[in-house]
């Protein structure tokens, strides 16, 4: 692998919605939500657009990396849905920060950040780019059904941006996609074509128990493949930075890997599930509080609709 992460910074909406806030209009309560998911609060967009959040995160990431906007020669944005269906969110960000370079969105659901790392590696290793801006940005609040207590309580909004360049931090990276639209999906509305027999609007649909089983199995099986390839064990990893979808998924994976709790950082209680944003957001917080430093060995793992997975082992440079 050919890259390292120079910087990573987050941006979240100002409004914080607690479990108690949701209980005012849903048949739910804090105990029901937190005991099943680990979530206490989530940030929800009110006046902010996704481009607003991206711009804030990008400016902080560029400053931290010590580069200029003009040094960016590729923008990859991981998102389920930007502010527009077209142009891409990546192009909207380029407009906002006034740069001109190739820019495109990818959609690998919650695995999007690791998918973006893999794409960036291809560009850097072939000499097509030097400094790549990766953005993960999600506004889950516009995708969920706010009358469905089983889904709307799970998600939040936010963005994270990172700058990657040539390096040797990544030691292993593997992507998969099962090709499954049944367990987790968001059907697009059919519009108002007079030739369409039926019309509908879409919301996130999820079979929670089956997604839970898939996630735990995936983390265990994909980690085994990674460790065998690198000739290491779980004991050699300093931190397991997992997609923050559900605290019980993380705990189940930790138990199967027989690792101590302190090696599995969790911040889902503050943000909920922000799809592809969760891993870079958590990396930002770990860098801020000093848990990640040069030489820290990280295992990144994500899973999402598709069913996609991304697994990455890196040594921080």
Image (cartoon, helix red, strand yellow):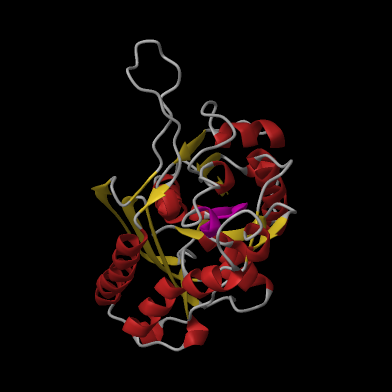
72 relative to 277, above or below: above
Q: Position of residue 158 (x, y in %)?
A: 62, 52
Quadrant of the frame with the N terminus: bottom left
Of 120 and 157, the residue lying toward us: 157
Q: Position of residue 115 (x, y in %)?
A: 40, 51
As for residue 154 lying within the magenta part, the answer is yes
Quadrant of the frame with the C terminus: bottom right
Of 197 and 132, the residue lying toward us: 197
Q: Is residue 178 left or right of residue 15?
A: left
Of 197 and 297, the residue lying toward us: 197
As for residue 134 lying within the magenta part, the answer is no
Which residue is farthest top?
A: 194
127 relative to 301, above or below: above
Inspect this view and state whether residue 106 appears: yes
Q: Is residue 299 left or right of residue 309?
A: right
Q: Position of residue 197 (x, y in %)?
A: 32, 17
Q: Residue at x 48, y 86 (%)?
A: 261
Count the labels in the image.
Answer: 0
Q: Is residue 66 left or right of residue 118?
A: right
Q: Residue at x 59, y 67 (%)?
A: 29
Inspect this view and state whether residue 98 appears: no
Q: Position of residue 47 (x, y in %)?
A: 74, 41
Q: Residue at x 39, y 81 (%)?
A: 254
243 relative to 195, above or below: below
Of 113 and 171, the residue lying toward us: 113
Q: Residue at x 44, y 45 (%)?
A: 204
Tell me which secondary structure the magenta stretch mostly adopts. strand
**What residue range appears in magenta?**
152-164
Question: In the figure, residue 15 lies in which quadrant?
Answer: bottom right
């Amino acid at each position: 692998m050919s890259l390292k992460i120079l910087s990573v910074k987050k941006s979240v909406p100002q409004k914080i919605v607690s479990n108690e806030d949701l209980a005012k209009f849903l048949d739910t309560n804090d105990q029901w939500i937190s005991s099943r998911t680990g979530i206490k609060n989530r940030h929800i967009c009110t006046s902010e657009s996704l481009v607003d959040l991206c711009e804030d995160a990008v400016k902080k990431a560029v400053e931290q990396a010590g580069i200029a906007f003009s040094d960016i020669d590729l923008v990859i944005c991981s998102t389920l849905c930007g502010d527009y269906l077209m142009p891409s969110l990546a192009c909207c960000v380029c407009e906002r920060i006034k740069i001109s370079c190739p820019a495109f969105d990818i959609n690998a659901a919650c695995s999007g950040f690791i998918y973006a790392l893999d794409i960036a590696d291809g560009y850097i290793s072939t000499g097509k780019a030097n400094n790549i801006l990766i953005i993960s940005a999600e506004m889950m609040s516009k995708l969920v059904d706010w009358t469905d207590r089983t889904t709307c309580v799970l998600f939040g909004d936010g963005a994270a941006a990172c700058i990657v360049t040539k390096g040797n931090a990544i030691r292993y990276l593997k992507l998969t996609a099962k090709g499954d639209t049944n367990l987790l999906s968001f059907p697009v509305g059919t519009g108002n074509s007079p030739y369409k027999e039926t019309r509908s609007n879409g919301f996130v649909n999820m079979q929670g128990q089956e997604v839970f089983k898939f996630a735990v199995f995936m983390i265990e099986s994909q980690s085994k493949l990674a460790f065998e390839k690198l000739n290491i064990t779980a004991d050699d990893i300093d931190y397991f930075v997992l997609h923050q979808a559900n605290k019980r998924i993380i705990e189940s994976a930790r138990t199967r890997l027989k690792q101590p709790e302190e090696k599995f950082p969790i911040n889902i209680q503050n943000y909920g599930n922000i799809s592809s944003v969760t891993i870079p957001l958590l990396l930002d917080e770990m860098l801020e509080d000093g848990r990640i430093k040069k030489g820290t060995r990280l295992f990144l793992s994500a899973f999402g609709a598709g069913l996609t997975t991304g697994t990455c082992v890196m040594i921080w440079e």
